[in-house]
Image (cartoon, grey):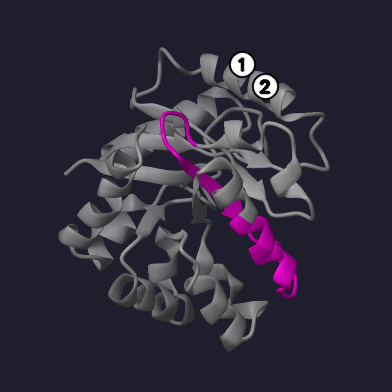
Amino acid sequence: MLVTEYHCHILPGMDDGAKDADMSLEMIEMMKNQGVSRICATPHFYAHREKSVSAFLQKRRAAYEKIRQRAAVQTIFLGAEIAIEHGISELPEIEKLAIEGTDLILLEFPYRPYEKWMSEEIYNIAAEYKLTVMLAHVHRYLEYYSKDEIRTILNTKAILQLNNEAFSSWKEKKIAKRVISEYEHFAFGSDAHNVTTRKPNWDLLQKKVRSEIIETSNAVLDRHRL
């Protein structure tokens, strides 16, 4: 099975993920041993912290070059996990943060009460740049949003990304199972940050989820290749 990792923080020194190239390579080796053959590397992007999209892209490329030749998995697509902020849809070159070679762009809701402007930013990015939005770890927002707000999020036209970890939590597993049963477009990711407390966990997913469901997730990348 061609397992695709849609959300992880393996690039060295980019964010709170892999601290250096050695940790990055170890994370990738763990993924390979768990059956991963394609990786979307998605370092955090916070518009208010970055000088510009171009500066972020240069930093991302430099981080990737540190591991490119030695990575156990050679098929790596560079992207970003973009925090939804006021005006993010108007940020110059925001479209360049889409996962390379695809029309997929990974967005993360803020950990705060839901407001209408968040959905407006998602809609504007999709409409203005002809991109397909993927919403990061939708199961995590249970603590922050009401049932109606969760319903609003799940009913967007976005691809709903689920972290593998959701299947180890009773509450989060309910949302994950609902997404799988009711929505056509979903994708899995480890959201791995290190090799200890937030390590790659594809072995967990493969124990909890049928292979044909994982295949549905794997197919998303190919369906959105440019």
Does residue 202 appear left or right of residue 56 in this picture? left
Q: What type is the residue that disc 2 sits on?
A: Lys
Q: Are marks 2 and 1 in contact (CB under 8 Å)?
A: yes
Numbered range of the magenta stretch: 99-123
Amino acid on which the number 1 mark rests in the picture: Ala
Residue at numbered disc 2: 59
- The N terminus appears in which quarter of the rendering? top left
Which residue is labeled 1 in the image? 62
**SS at mark 1?**
helix
Q: Residue drawn at (46%, 29%), measured in percent from left and top?
A: 100
* 106 is within the stretch colored magenta: yes
Against 131, residue 122 (above or below) is below
Question: Label 2: few (<14), some or many (≥20) within 10 Å?
Answer: few
Q: Position of residue 14 (x, y in %)?
A: 66, 31
The residue drawn where x is 44% and y is 68% is 166
x, y percentage for residue 137? 51, 61
Q: Is residue 158 visible?
A: yes
Q: Quadrant of the C terminus?
A: top left
Q: Is residue 117 left or right of residue 4?
A: right
- Near mark 1 (Cα within 10 A), the count class, few <14, some 14-19 or many ≥20, is some
Residue 39 in the image: x percent, y percent? 39, 36
Residue at position x 51%, y 52% from top? Answer: 133
Cα separation between marks 2 and 1: 5 Å
Which is more toward the observer, 218 or 183?
A: 183
x 42%, y 45%: residue: 6
